[in-house]
Image (cartoon, rainbow, N blue to C red):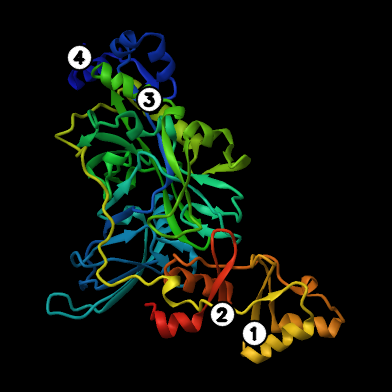
Amino acid sequence: MMKTIKEINEKIKKGEAVIVRADEMPEIYEENPKRAAKEVDIVTTGTFGAMCSSGALLNFGHSDPPIKMQRIWLNNVEAYTGLAAVDAYLGATQLSEDRGFEYGGAHVIEDLVKGVEVNLKATAYRTDCYPRKEVETAITLDDMNQAWLLNPRNCYQKYNAAINSTNTLLQTYMGTLLPNFGNVNFSGTGEISPLNNDPNYETIGLGTRIFLCGAKGHVISEGTQHSPKTGFGTIFVQGDLKEMSPDFIAGATIPNYGTSLFVGIGIPIPILNEDVAKSTAVRNKDITVNLFDYGVPRRTRPVVREVNYEELFSGKVDINGKKVRTSSQSSMKVSHKIMETLGQWVEDKEFFLSKPIKNLPGDSEFRPLKVKEETKFVADIMIKKAITAYQKDSLKKVSEILVKNAIDQIPIVDSNNKLVGIVTTWDITKALAKGEKRISEIMTKRVITSRKDEPIDVVARRLDKNSIGSTPVVDEDNRVIGIITMADIIHRGVSK
């Protein structure tokens, strides 16, 4: 049994097309696969989440006298101008020069869609045909000639989940990760995600018409880092910003990471044959991802375990016998609204399907950046014989160790050399003033540590973030095997 997009469009025109949501299709298919493939014409899908690789291509028009805009700022967020005199690309993750993480390109895009007036400032060098050197004005979306949402990498088929094994809180693009396996963050919409419903790209390709932030947009290519071999396909999408709705596009601030743009995408999957029908019957329990330990900020970070979207959406996953709370970084509520809206558009004959003029590649795989200079790790520069003390040691003894070795902090270990705390010269000073006598009473028990296989750039960030000069280096059993200082990194690591 085969259907064509042309035949389905004819059914849309006649008001006869059978449209179901992606979360309804599994049950319909399981009842009778052949009947589902024959009777269902379109399955609507949806996703709404942070998609950092997004932005807007804008044309401002020429002023009088004209200016060849060399640098442009919108609400003090700089846009890229190496295109033409009055064209610019505003990236969603570009930060404001005066508001930091609180405001960026994504927020400017949201403001424009909402009809808010934004400040445009441009500077230039003078030429005979472009004599103006600077301009500053206020504009709205309606004032622009063209304003296109142009997103190079959107709509990941699925996303890996994140957890943090360290004893310090981490703030990442996957949100805030609590220490000591305190929570699991994940993204994506599982069984209703567009690319999960057409993993072989039989219906999604160059020219596919889609729902994009409340407007009709198109897929114009595979997305950057498109990796269908590993189940992580992406798409490059484009649509008219002037037609979009603030219900389906929003600027976001990810704490201590940066800004991103929440993008709403829905793709209607035409049921052309039984294979496509089977793909749209996917369930959350069948979509698996790796749960990575983001406490190891490297490309080869360890996998804690494999999880599926059914577990993730349940609210808790099992980690070594412990139930750990999960949290989604995508909005299922808005994603369902996208599916419903897209279905209504089709039913009202406002949206017709388009046949791709070229299929997306199905055999490509993501490749990491090739770096020629050698990466240095903690093991390369750490001091391997760390000076330590014991909980049973007196304040006097620990003070003498600090003075003798000209150091201002010392790791406290147990009889097996396992780290139990840390003491600084300031701790000693306070203890003497208060009359405290035991190391166990004054030591800091939650210690910021490092591992020998970590890149020194990662440790430098950790030291800077926590305003400390050094950290103990521990092994998998939390035994102290060395120490690394900022001085080591600067003088021996030469971290750039």
- Which of 269/1 is in front? 1
Horizontally, is 397 left or right of 434 in the view? left
Classify 49 as above or below 203: below
- Residue that badge 1 annotates: 408
Secondary structure, mark 1, is loop
Give the image quarter of residue 391: bottom right
Q: Secondary structure at mark 2?
A: loop
Asked whether the viewer can see residue 338, the reply is: no
Q: Badge 4: how crowded within 10 Å, few (<14), some, or many (20+)?
A: few
Which circle marks residue 469 in the picture? Answer: 2
Pick whichever of labels 1 and 2 is earlier in the sequence. Answer: 1
Q: Amino acid at mark 4?
A: Met
Tell me residue 119's x, y (percent): 39, 66
Residues 477 and 95: in front is 477
Mark 3 or mark 2, which has the lower sequence index? 3
Residue extending farthest front: 415
Is 460 left, or right, of 14 in this rendering?
right
What secondary structure is found at the residue carrying circle 4? loop
Q: Residue furthest left?
A: 128
For this rendering, which residue is in front, 16 or 488? 488
Q: Is residue 495 left or right of residue 210?
A: right
Per the image, the residue denoted by label 3 is 343
- Label of residue 2 in the image: 4
Amino acid at circle 1: Asp
